[in-house]
Image (tube, coloured by chain):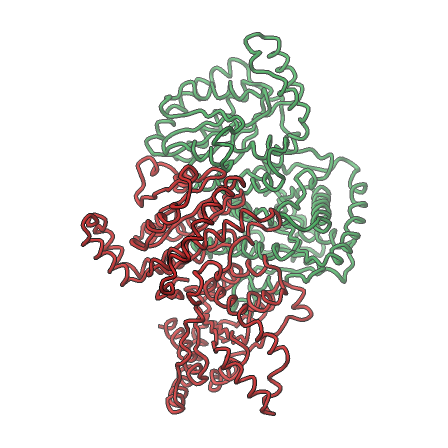
Chain colours: A red, B green
Amino acid sequence: MLDSLDLSQQLPKGKYKEYLAPLKNELRDLQREVINARRPVIILFEGLEASGKGDSIRKVVEPLDPRGFNVELTPLELTPEDALRPPLRRFWLRIPAQGEIGIFDRSWYMPALAARVNGATKDPEWSERKEEIKQFERQLVEDGTILIKFWLHISKREQKRRFKKIEKSRYGGWRISKSDWKEHKRYSQYNTVADELLVETDTPYAPWTIVPANDRYYRRIHVLRTITETLKRCVRQVPGANDVIVSLPTSSERHPPETGSILDRVDLTKSLSREEYEAELKKGQNRLRELEYACYERRIPVIIVYMGWDAAGKGGNIKRLTQELDPRGYTVYPIAAPQGDEATHHYLWRFWKRLPKAGHFAIFDRSWYERVLVERIEGFCTEAEWKRAYYEINEFERHLAHFGTVITKFWLHIDKEEQWRRFEDRKNTPAKQHKINEEDYRNREKWDLYAVAVNEMIERTSTNYAPWTIVEGNCKLWARIKTLKTIIAALESRIG
Amino acid sequence: MLDSLDLSQQLPKGKYKEYLAPLKNELRDLQREVINARRPVIILFEGLEASGKGDSIRKVVEPLDPRGFNVELTPLELTPEDALRPPLRRFWLRIPAQGEIGIFDRSWYMPALAARVNGATKDPEWSERKEEIKQFERQLVEDGTILIKFWLHISKREQKRRFKKIEKSRYGGWRISKSDWKEHKRYSQYNTVADELLVETDTPYAPWTIVPANDRYYRRIHVLRTITETLKRCVRQVPGANDVIVSLPTSSERHPPETGSILDRVDLTKSLSREEYEAELKKGQNRLRELEYACYERRIPVIIVYMGWDAAGKGGNIKRLTQELDPRGYTVYPIAAPQGDEATHHYLWRFWKRLPKAGHFAIFDRSWYERVLVERIEGFCTEAEWKRAYYEINEFERHLAHFGTVITKFWLHIDKEEQWRRFEDRKNTPAKQHKINEEDYRNREKWDLYAVAVNEMIERTSTNYAPWTIVEGNCKLWARIKTLKTIIAALESRIG
């Protein structure tokens, strides 16, 4: 989840104050609603040192009535009193009462994370720890607690810059200790373990909001919007069906407006010349064939998922990918709307049926991700269902990865103009006319809705064990080589 | 959960056919409702060899229309095809469609259990396995599946008897193999691991029904009643608020009628003479004091929970327990209805506050179990809340046990007549009058409701790591010695 984050995000120039003022007013009013609704609220801030937890908390509490909130600091070291009790007790004692807001500067995550990175928490213990955290949060949320979790993410370079700046500041030198620098050196270790922890605890009842925090204005607006949107939904909703799950704002409601999404920032000018392409293609296809045999020998199952806009070039891409492969080693599954038996089973059923044997490739042209795209947008499933699906899909892929499957997922991206050109081309070329119909045009009208869903999908389901790769697709040649190289790299890194 | 089961249960004489006929009719009708409601149904039977899985399945399918169900056999060994895929795939492929009933003769549990007992599944893998099973079941139930899980439990002696009988039978000899006898020898190992697996997978969305299966008529009625009661609730309920959790029949609705509950079978004639008592008390109290120091030295936290009927003798029992203890080493917490801060937090909050330090004893006079007793009966919490509580409490105690806490829990049992005598005695003895009031009499009127709740509590929350002990309490002297000895045994087994 952390690797897919774009840390270069900034607020549009001069917009900060304009955004800030209404959010603060809203938050002040919402505090009263929280009190009237008698809901406990927990807002927790996690992130590496100097990622802006303290500053975020200051901004959150500014508009609040101080009689209704409490800021809880979590030292990494246990007090002697705490060391004699089960690990979660110290957090249980600090949960807010009904109508109160508990704000945690670090929480139950960072102590668990640090102990894991330092090697103090070994394997079976580590599973137990994560399980206990999930149980704790589920118990609170089922009891009515509104739980908002932030991970503030900064780059290693930004952390270093901040440490140096703080050290030089007049009164701040003491704030950066040797152990902070030690943490800094292990930045990537921390990140890897954090990512695992975040994915596994990104549950339907207590999802994470991961905030790109290199730019502090961006970070503040992101945090405040997430809080106001979440509180609004949770406090005002009619209690009832699955309210624990459906009450959370979508990604686009949480990000600061006008800052652009993951897709907006894709550089679609990337391209390859025909000669570069031919050379790379030949080389790549041959290498992939070697790897296909190596996977067979080592009994490694491989899953390759293609998603993308209509006319983004999935078909042609898959064709080049498989051109030189041994056909006994792979299967391509085109996925359309479920029919018959497949419509009367759980939506994941038909994909469980299509899992590759160990040693084989399964290539999906569309996939289980339709649950959070077309089924979401067209209303083929309920809101509760597609919100639950992020978690279900992460569990599904984790199960496969744990069995040893290499999973690569591609979003083939083009812009709206390029899609139009390709539609027109299809319409006007007799040999391509079968590839275009009314429905494609209807989908195109919902482009913006789909864009929101795609962004959220990539945010919520990019994991260490099954990462998304966004493929710049306006130039088909570039796109084909990029997918080929990505797969080769993933397989090489597994085979070592 | 298995250890607290009374395997001597039988049907009342001559009642079998009288019970069976209406259940079969009901089940036949319910199948039609399942089809109309388009709900997938999974009924799974687990249990050691010869526990009656096949016979149970025959009885279930007898009244069913064969076009609507399917019986799935699960071999313990993987086929070569299955071995090349993730472990749960073979079960995913076999899940029923909407309106179909899938009946599993063994399911995803027994292969996992066998691999664990045989040592093939090591520690981190084992956690992963259990987690995957829970995810699988949650995904199905959230999608609308009605999941009914049976564990058929027989004693080791009964298993042996059945093996021998089958071996002698004309066509059955081949049915008992060497590996079955090997399993028989490891009966207690299987039981221990099964208990762990059952507790952890006894979730609010997919609870277990554990069936005493030594008597086959009892077993059949128990199974059929559980299925009809569950289907009725699930199929007929209005979908909505938390339906995933609240739709299951209580323990008394599942057991065959008139067969008596756990409490009914307590032998209340047990007693001690004054001399025996004095001698045992002295010895026990001295030993407990030694153990108190030993726990302090080894930093072992100890929790002792007292629950029981009004006037069952909790106070006097605790007094004898603590009489010779070093008062610096223990605290007694009397638990009344929550007030103030404790009423505005999660119900477990006040118990997290009262956890013993490592090396100390915490003795609870009433406890978190009030959630499933008085709060349930008096309507102080919702049905969804108290049904969820079994799982929450098991998680809570597991967290404590995992930290190293020794947990013993007592239900002090007396009969209704004995309670009446004690109430009258209190009323008529000036020094005891403060111990009795109107409310005690009101509670007494709800005796039968409480009995149902107590039985269910003991069934659902007796775990290896925090077992219940039922204390025969009509003779107070007997009761005091039994609790004392139980605690001593638990501490000695920890200290070794």
Give the x, y percent position of residue B68: 75, 60
- Answer above or below: position of B480 versus A204: above
Give the x, y percent position of residue B443: 64, 24
Left or right? Give the position of B150 relative to A198: right
**Residue nearest the observer in this picture, B303 or A141:** A141
Give the x, y percent position of residue B496: 39, 35
Q: Residue at x 37, y 42 (%)?
A: A71
Q: Residue at x 52, y 65 (%)?
A: B86
**Residue nearest the observer in this picture, A60 or A301:** A60
Left or right? Give the position of A467 relative to A342: left
Left or right? Give the position of B333 relative to B458: left
Left or right? Give the position of A177 relative to A342: left
Residue B349 visible in the picture: yes
| Residue B447 in which image quadrant | top right
| Residue A446 in which image quadrant | bottom right
- Answer above or below: position of A128 versus B319: below
Q: Residue at x 62, y 64 (%)?
A: A379
**Residue nearest the observer in this picture, B314 or A359:** B314
Give the x, y percent position of residue A14: 36, 62
**Residue nearest the observer in this picture, B200 or A238:** A238
Q: Quadrant of the N terminus of chain B?
A: top right
Total labels: the figure holds: 0
| Residue A151 in which image quadrant | bottom left
Residue B163 visible in the picture: no
